[in-house]
Amino acid sequence: MLKTNINNSPIGVFDSGVGGLTVANAIRQVLPNEKLIYFGDTAHLPYGDKSKETVIGYSARITQFLLEQQCKVIVVACNTASANAYDTIMAEAEKKAGVVDVINPVVEYVTAVKKFRHIGVIGTKGTINSGTYVSKIIARNPHVSVASLATPMLVPMIEEGFIFDDISNAIVRSYLSRPELSQIDSLILGCTHYPIIKNQINKFYNFKVDVIDSSKIVANHLRKILAENKQLNENTTEPKHRFLVSDYTDYFQAISKLFFEEDIVLEKVSIF
């Protein structure tokens, strides 16, 4: 349950890097009156190859920081953190802020759509090895099959700007041609970087597989929660968002536009 009388408080969004800006961008589009505080832990990325204990430690500290910023909801815009640190984040935020991750809303969505019978999931090693998507989907609907595949080269590929070229096409084709994904009717993009290459993935499947972008699902889920708890910000003044990173480079500044679809200013802050 969210706190009351905090409609004007910001929404905190965090990820291991700038990939979670795809979620922040979707939230901005769905909830244009809401102020966002985004934190990208660029000093410690990627989370996908870190131990569970390490991911929990980073996530707990970022959650504490966003609570200090008086955020009314914390959106865990990182699949690896959602898979490995969700319980810890919930405990940290208990009675202080709501928590929305990027896995549970997608699980609810795919299990509610009855046409999805053979679901595929791609993500980082940390996300896939946790088994979270598979266990949660099967728990809600034991009559579907779920095939998961770690695709660790996709994040560095996207961050290096290899999109819709021969290199990225070869990597995407190599992963999606694997036998694990041969019978799927839907594919969950289990990493917030992956919406950047959604069109590329759709093209590989000749648009015959439903490619599921978690960022839009999460944004709509967040709107529903805020509406139910009467926490929507009705102030129509254009909000001023903040974009924070734990390590700044000109490179991250440049690629942030790829994820947020407009120029933004990244601020370096030290919280660890």
Image (tube, helix red, strand yellow):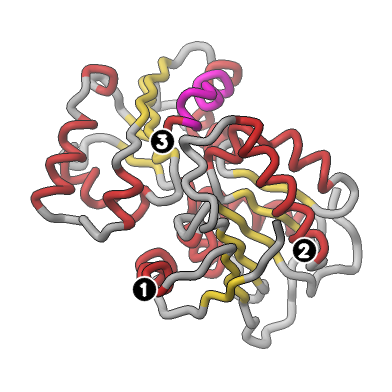
Query: Residue beneath label 3, please?
Result: 123
Is the residue marked by circle 3 packed among few (<14), some (14-19), or many (20+) residues within 10 Å?
many
Mark with earlier residue (1, 3): 3
Task: Note whether 51 is above or below 25 in the view shown.
Answer: above
- Could you tell me which secondary element the residue under label 1 belongs to? helix
Circle on res. 254: 1
The three-letter amino acid code for the residue at tag 1 is: Ala
Viewer-side label of 1, 2: 1
Q: Position of residue 80 (x, y in %)?
A: 54, 38
Is residue 216 one of those drawn in magenta?
A: no
Quadrant location of residue 271?
bottom right
Give the distance between the C-alpha atoms of the residues marked 1 and 3, in whole angstroms: 24 Å
Mark with earlier residue (3, 2): 2
- Could you tell me which secondary element the residue under label 2 belongs to? loop
Is residue 132 one of those drawn in magenta?
A: yes
Q: Residue at x 85, y 68 (%)?
A: 6
Query: Residue beneath label 2, please?
Result: 71
Give the distance between the C-alpha atoms of the residues marked 1 and 2, in whole angstroms: 27 Å
